[in-house]
Amino acid sequence: MKVAVGIRNLICSYGKFQVLKDISFSISRGDFFIVIGPNGSGKTTLMKTIAGIRRFEKGRLDILESSIDGYTRKTLSQTVAMVPQEVAADFPFTVNELVLMGRAPYLGMLGLAQKGDMEIANQAISFTGAEHLAHRKLDQLSGGERQLVFIARAICQQPQIMLLDEPTASLDLAHQTKIMDLMEKLKVEKGITVVMVSHDVNLAAMYGDTLLLLKEGKVVSMGIPEDVLTFKLLEEAYGCTLLVDESPLGKFPRVTPVPLKLIKPLPIRPGRMD
């Protein structure tokens, strides 16, 4: 099977602190690959490293089976698009203008968009179902609408690999499902490899072809949801009490956090017993 992202013995640090600690794994082309794990496990650093935003100290990183070192910033941007964890709301641009910025890696010396670039931008907006937002400014949009627009800008880059860092964080249930369905559509209809960070293990179970569980910069487990989302592995990674059973929607795991009040007897308050 062809590999979209290959990582071997990768070490990435902030100063003297190692964030990613000698990790190795690969992502197959056309996969919906979801990275999970507790806070501080290195998920965002991993995404920035794959995107070429952060440098790594040791190891090897291949994009489409070629070393990332062989890519220029322009050619990497034509291959990999990233939607960051936080998207600013204060850009003084309309949705049309912002999405068209996704064509930047393809523009000539003068940086002027041509008719074909505008057609690709319109197609990206249409693909995300954001046509009704096209002439509105970014600061007039809700969080979920802004996320759609930044995804449309990434699609406008025509990448082969799409990276998303917690795209459903802080969104309501309807927008969460819309974003995840859109990623599935990208994978199926455009053949794009989707690599996503998510704190929602239940969304990961429903949508992910492959899950990667990180803890403290190391790989705890990688595989299909049924193999990764087990009680033993999740308790080891998150350090809390969980219930793992089969989802009523299909043959994939459902994870339920167990509140402390349901596993620890409440203290007896002084007073009269009737």
Image (cartoon, rainbow, N blue to C red):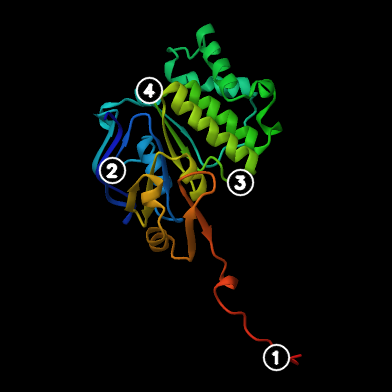
Residue on which disc 3 sits:
170
Residue 213 appearing in the image: no
Name which of mark 1 and mark 4 comes first in the sequence.
4
Pointer 3 with pointer 4, Cβ within 8 A = no
Residue 231 appearing in the image: yes
Which label sits in the foreground, 3 or 4? 3
Q: Label 4: state its secondary structure.
A: helix
Residue on which disc 4 sits:
74
- For marks 2 and 3, give the CA distance: 29 Å
Name which of mark 2 and mark 3 comes first in the sequence.
2
Question: In which quarter of the view is residue 191 placed?
Answer: top left
Name which of mark 3 and mark 4 comes first in the sequence.
4
Q: Three-letter amino acid code at disc 3?
A: Ser
- For marks 3 and 4, give the CA distance: 32 Å
Name which of mark 1 and mark 3 comes first in the sequence.
3
Residue 224 image offset from top left, x and y in percent: 37, 44
Q: Three-letter amino acid code at disc 2?
A: Phe
Residue sitting at x 59%, y 19%: 126
Q: Label 1: state its secondary structure.
A: loop
Q: Label 3: state its secondary structure.
A: loop
Which label sits in the foreground, 2 or 1? 1
Residue on which disc 2 sits:
25
Front residue of 176 and 47: 176
- For marks 1 and 3, give the CA distance: 41 Å
